[in-house]
Amino acid sequence: MKNITFRFLVSIGIITLVATSVCAKPVKAAAELPQLLQQDGRYALMVDGAPFVMLGAQVHNSSNYPQALKKVWPAIKDMNANTVEIPVAWEQIEPVEGKFDFSYVDTLLAQARQNKVRLVLLWFGTWKNTNPQYSPAWVKLDNARFPRMVNKDGKPSYCLSPFGEETLKADKKAFVALMSHLKKIDQAHHTVILIQVENEVGTYGLVRDFGVKAQAAFNQPVPQLVLDHKKSLVPLAATGTWSEVYGEYADQYFHTYAIATYIEEIAKAGRAVLDLPMYINNALRDPFDTAPWKDNFASGGPTYDVIDIYKAIAPHISFSAPDIYGPESAKFTATLDRFQRPDNPLVLPEMSNAAEYVRYTYLVLGRGALGFAPFGIDYADYSNFPLGSKLTDKTMVAPFGKIYAAFRPMARQWAKWAFEGRTYGVAESDARTAQTIALKNWKATVSFREWQFGEKAWFPNLKDLPANTEQPNGGVAFAQTGDNEFIIVGQHARVKIDGAAANAGKASLWARVEEGHFDPSGKWVMERVWNGDQVDYGLNLTGNPVVLKVTMGTY
Ligand code: DGJ
């Protein structure tokens, strides 16, 4: 957790501002398209005029057909998701050049509305995981008109070249057709709240295009916009060709520039028709690796090290987002640190659906992400193990579903608190040690593998450990809703809160701990009060997440 107290203090000043901008024009606000707001480096995704957090689920890659949707909705219901991320493939909307078929899109939007969820549409066009497989046959089989990248020996790669003028023209035309159709059927509904442009772009096995056009561009001076945003990691020339300025990083940065230029043109054209926020997702490189590309990640994709190039070249892309399929806690957290920046909101459009990732739901939502989506959430009877879970039924969905069930009734409040800088998150680390969080005038300590009674030190000979904690699966999310008031949701963790800063050294107690929920109007409804054993040793959160409203007191 970096400098969270500071984040909170900074947030105090914006509360009125946000409330004013949302409340001042309620009628207009409801008519406004989804958009991103930024204040002091924090973000809100505004949907129907108020902050919204995507409790999302991404379906499998081939679930984008009307028949397949039948196996999507039951899983989404079990998940308690409020948003579904789902592909729209170029090959399905334009199977024959110039002839568009939006029947799937129509079915999808109608069923999403019936199921009371929003949609994030994933545009699988020129590149899906760097590959042209979702482009129509008339594109992916015509090398002459839609060229592939070539290596130094002129041998073609599998990947389409970002220098293919016809490819860009054709992808843009199809994307604009999609956005025009959405404008017709959804402008007043806001069922679709975000658009992902392409999917995990970049190239494996080849650092950049070495074709004639690409080479000519590579020999040109680096554009000023790139120079302004991206400093060389090594002291080299301040201006000049890509090689002169960026040395060993030149090929990767140039390819990034080429893909960013391509994507910008598509996003810009799409937003000119219907101005929805658009983003790109990333197949990660190791967050601790800073060395030049050595065939260890997709060159040209929005890896953490080149987000600045996308910012410079693709202003119609609102953010770059990480897809996380590595469970190690240190890397997971480092990846969030790399992508959550004052100029780049945190969104996890994909995360493994395996059990060891469940704990990260609290960390990501607590860090104020605009959205979060485990991948492979449908009942299509397909497992992407070892990236994801081996399970393909309710038992795969349930661990996430019970967390979303706690968050969903207060999702709007949570999004507002996040925008105000009031939220914090913890996931149990692989080391399984206790973690502390600096709140405003309070400090929370979160520990794991505790029994619900007493302190570990009292029972030195006790070897038993709580059931279902064999793997790290604890997590807690906090919102500080007042000076001494917190909303807490978590699982498999013990929470203690002590005075800090202005309250440091003061004797403190749980003034009141209520378990309850928020009703649809946003009013807190108390179900019971925790006291006695339920608070004497901290708040012991079990495997069943509940929402607690906690008031601290000093004496
Ligand atoms: C990341 C991709 O973006 C997804 O579409 C999917 O292929 C997963 N990897 C793997 O299941």
Image: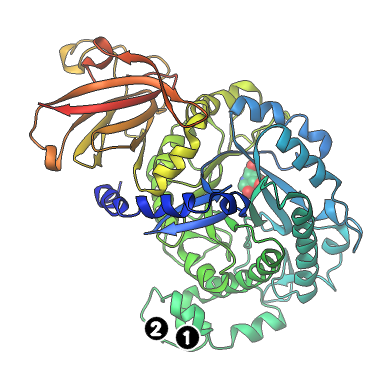
Going 44% across and 62% down the picture, which residue do you hit?
343
Tell me where residue 168 appears, x and y as whole percent: 75, 70
* Residue 236 image label: 2
Residue beneath label 1, please?
244
Q: Nearer the viewer, residue 168 or 533?
A: 533
Q: Is residue 153 left or right of residue 329?
A: right
Question: Residue 100: which quarter of the image?
Answer: bottom right
* Residue 356 image label: none
Going 68% across and 51% down the picture, which residue do you hit?
122
Give the structural element (helix, strand or loop) at label 2: loop
What amino acid type is highlighted by mark number 1? Glu
Tell me where residue 138 appears, x and y as whole percent: 88, 62
Decide which of tag 2 and tag 1 comes sooner along the chain: 2
* Quadrant holding the C terminus: top left
Q: Is residue 287 left or right of residue 48?
A: left
Above or below residue 172? Residue 231 is below
Above or below residue 430? Residue 14 is below
- Distance Cα–Cα, label 2 vs label 1: 7 Å
